[in-house]
């Protein structure tokens, strides 16, 4: 497989991941973080870092809008619920294990 095809496949897979996450707005970021060590915010930070690596100036909110498909505050108001004490406790453990992958 040539480099361009690999890049196109990776981009297609990323777009499909975003579509899947959009359809599963019921899945809370804290649950993703607790189970996988990353969440939508991590994806947006990685996107922002990739842009920066290529000399593209992108702020956190712009990157989040790409991942969430809308302004983050709007998504949060529509879909995010208050974390339970159990979720918070699990998050503390996950955060400690995955500190390099998390973003607020």
Image (tube, rainbow, N blue to C red):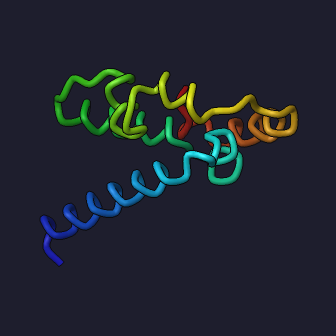
- Expressed as whole percent of the image width and height from the top left, the position of residue 47 reads 34, 39
Q: Is residue 41 above or below residue 9?
A: above
> Residue 42 location, x and y as percent?
49, 38
Single out the residue that lies furthest toward the right: 85
Q: Is residue 102 left or right of residue 4?
A: right
Residue at image coords 49%, 51% = 21
Q: Which residue is drawn at 18% across and 29% down?
A: 56
Q: Residue at x 56, y 35 (%)?
A: 102
Give percent across and percent down for residue 24: 55, 52
Q: Is 94 on the left-hand or right-hand side of 51?
A: right
Instruction: Say which of 65 and 23 sits in front.
Output: 23
Q: Which quadrant holds residue 12?
A: bottom left
Query: Is residue 11 shown above or below 75?
Result: below
Along the viewing direction, whichever of 102 and 71 lies nearer the viewer: 71
Quadrant in which the N terminus appears: bottom left
Q: Quadrant of the C terminus?
A: top right
Give x and y (percent) for residue 10: 29, 62
Q: How many marks?
A: 0
Q: As drawn, is 33 to the left or to the right of 16?
A: right
Residue 17, above or below 48: below
Residue at 62% in and 47% down? 26
- Is 11 on the left-hand or right-hand side of 71? left
Q: Nearer the viewer, residue 98 or 30?
A: 30
Residue situated in front as seen by the camera: 75 or 98 = 75
Q: Which residue is at the far front? A: 78
């Amino acid at each position: 497989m040539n480099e361009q095809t690999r890049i196109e496949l990776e981009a297609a897979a990323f777009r499909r991941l975003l579509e899947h996450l959009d359809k599963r707005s019921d899945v809370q970021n804290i649950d993703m973080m607790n189970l996988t060590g990353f969440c939508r915010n991590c994806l947006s930070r990685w996107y922002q870092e990739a842009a920066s690596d290529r000399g593209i100036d992108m702020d956190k909110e712009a990157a989040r809008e790409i991942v969430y498909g809308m302004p983050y505050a709007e998504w949060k108001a529509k879909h995010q619920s208050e974390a339970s004490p159990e979720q918070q406790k699990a998050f503390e453990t996950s955060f400690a294990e995955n500190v390099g992958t998390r973003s607020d």
